[in-house]
Image (cartoon, rainbow, N blue to C red):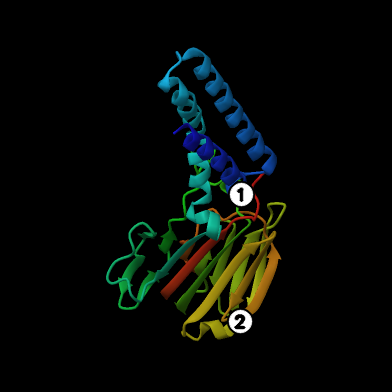
Amino acid sequence: MRLALVLTLLGALVTHVVTYDDWADGPWREYSLGATVSYSLALIVWFVARVQVPPGRVATVLPWLAATCVLLPGEAVHYLRVRHPLTTTRAHVVETDFSVVGGQLPRGQWLTDASGGGEVRVEAGHVLVTAPPGSLAFLDMRQPEIQDVAVAYWLPRGLSRSWSSESVEWDVSVSRTGNFLVLLDTGTCVIQSTDYGLLISYRDEQGETKVQQLEAPQLNDGRPHRFFVERHNGLIRLRVDDFPLWVAPNPRQWTFVRLGETRSGAEHSGEMRITQVRYQRRYAATAAV
């Protein structure tokens, strides 16, 4: 039994090194220092138990069991981190196909907000967002929870840093009755439908609000169009139907993701049909130092 415990401890040490993942476990310097401290404590415990326990069969095994118990918590945390789904994907994904959800929104993924006569309801194959003048009506996505790895220490260390990029893609057809209709609001960027195409307001790297008008009248044809907005490497990009329309500096993380009318002005009104949404938050390749 003593030999088995010795081999187990040596195997754990080798595996601890071989299975190291920089995103899950953090920088190698910190990881190796933690392992050194753990195994040093285990050696001290082994020595104390060896000295204190009276000679006999128990004294042969107990020091090794005590050393193993010292190492188990650290090994357990390590394997919880490297086996976490995000260690493989390094991305949170929220994806909803409203054409197959039935008569209600998927639980835990979406909230709705409607006031002043606005309405959000699930119909056959889509979500209908109706916003008369002076109203609010939008889908509010429940973004993946931001965890504090200092508290939830069993989570991958890579979650401790800001995510490097995020994107949202959705299929929507728009029927605007006013001068404006908000399509997307992230807190740092607002995209609105207009007569001439799109009006985009966003905050740049200095935090100043900028406004951009895009000539795209074809988006007013009432047919479904696929919008894709991505924030990556300090830039925000917009594609519609796989065609690049706009790019600008916008390093700020999104506060929320809302699809629909988030402005209650008298010039804002219309309706939209949303059939599919996909949000993705991608994390950087290495953990914070």
Q: Which mark is residue 132?
A: none
> Is residue 203 in view from this perspective?
yes
The residue type indicated by label 2 comes to: Ala
Q: What residue type is disc 1 on?
A: Val
* Residue at 47% across, 85% down: 223
Q: Work out how far the residue at label 2 is from the one at label 1, CA to CA, in angstroms.
A: 54 Å
From the top left corner, tell me how far across and down residue 258 is, in percent. 47, 61
Q: Residues within 10 Å of mark 1 (few under 14, many from 20)?
A: few
Residue 220 to residue 168: above or below: below
Q: Residues within 10 Å of mark 2 (few under 14, many from 20)?
A: some
Which of the 4 quarters of the picture holds residue 118?
bottom left
| Location of mark 2 (residue) | 216
- As rendered, which of 186 and 134 lies closer to the eye? 186
Which residue is nearer to you in this view: 59 or 78? 59
**Disc 1 designates what residue?**
18
Q: Is residue 261 visible?
A: no
Residues tagged 2 and 1 counted as in contact (Cβ below 8 A): no
Report x, y in % for residue 128.
Answer: 36, 73
Residue at 65% from the left image edge and 77% from the top image edge:
244
What kind of element bears circle 2? loop
